[in-house]
Image (cartoon, rainbow, N blue to C red):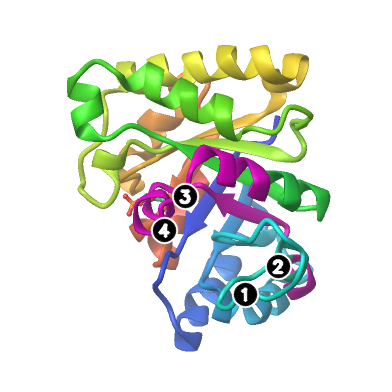
Amino acid sequence: MKKLAAGNWKMNGNRAALAEVAALLAAHPTPACDMLLCPPTTLLAEMATLAQGSALKVGGQDCHAKTFGAHTGDVSAAMLVDAGASYVILGHSERRADHGETDALVLAKAEAAIAAGLIAIICVGETEAQRDAGETLAVIGAQLDGSVPANATAAALVLAYEPVWAIGTGRTPTLNQIAEVHNFLRARLTAHIGVEAANTRLLYGGSVKPSNAAEIFAVPDVDGALVGGASLKAADFGAIVAALT
Ligand code: 13P
């Protein structure tokens, strides 16, 4: 399978930041992996125009489950497609925490995204308290069960394991802990979507940076990364892209 280096800009970046995208494309015109940036919605169309004809794909950071309607402040999957997106991140822990998103809502969004032709990147991950209580696999198993569409295919789905306590903290799980979770996710996903699970990309996210990318990518069942802070700078994200072969 083609691995995936995905960057999540979160609520960061203005139009001037698109210079980083130009620098990334100049330095990595033909990466060995798939390369994706998910900017704030305000930058999506312009970044998609910049990426046209290149190896870079662009994606949204969320979408509504409905196609259109009276939902002030929201954006639909079809609108993301119209702006040039081919992926959308769903169920990120920041949305689960900031906006009270439930597994059922993430499932509805994922179904809408896939129906609109987007690849859904569904995020799961435990809090530090849950890990300390020995609940990690139970928590992410329940999140997977509740949010992955039953008919999802490897071409339309990406799963991202993002331990909440590793996001933006500079802390990461041990390589053994990452391996344990990714192995578990592959098996659990197989129970849902059968053989498609073997080719579904499983990303690790949480404080991935140039200095730890290679060792994380060497972990079995890690098929790429979902990168926050280090995706904002072309040099850092480019180094992570280059580490993913
Ligand atoms: P950081 O890479 O900044 O820890 O963020 C990870 C993340 O939440 C990506 O979605």
Label 3 residue SS: loop
Disc number lying in front (4 or 2): 4
Earlier residue among tags 2 and 1: 1
Q: How far apart are marks 4 and 2 (CA)?
A: 20 Å
Q: Where is residue 100 in the image (x, y as percent from the top left)?
A: 41, 52
Mark 3 or 2: in front is 3
Residue type at mark 4 is His
Left or right of 171: which side holds 88?
A: right
Q: What crowding class fits label 4: few (fewer than 14 Cα within 10 Å), some (14-19), or many (20 or more)?
A: few
- Residue at 60 percent of width and 67 percent of height: 25
Residue 159: where, in percent of width, then height?
57, 35
For image coordinates 34% across by 43% down, the residue present is: 206
Residue bearing the label numbered 1: 44
Q: What stretch is highlighted in magenta?
A: 81-109
Residue at left offset 19%, top offset 19%: 133
Contact between labelled residues 3 and 4, with CB atoms less than 8 Å apart: yes
First reached walking from the N terminus: tag 1 or tag 4: 1
Between residue 134 and residue 165, name the one nearer to us. Answer: 134
Say which label, 4 or 2, has the lower sequence index: 2
Q: Is residue 151 left or right of 231 when viewed as pictured? A: right
> Which mark identifies residue 99?
4
Q: Which of marks 2 and 1 is in front?
A: 2
Q: Tell which circle, 3 or 2, labels the residue nearer the N-terminal end.
A: 2
Helix, strand or loop at disc 1? helix
Q: What element carries label 2?
A: helix
Q: Is mark 4 on a helix, strand or loop?
A: loop
Task: Kindly identify which residue carries mark 3.
Answer: 101
Tell me whether circle 2 and circle 1 mark residues in contact (CB < 8 Å): yes
Q: In which quarter of the image is residue 153?
A: top right
Q: Of discs 1 and 4, which sits in the foreground?
A: 4
Rounded to the nearest angstrom, the CA distance separating label 2 from label 1 is 8 Å
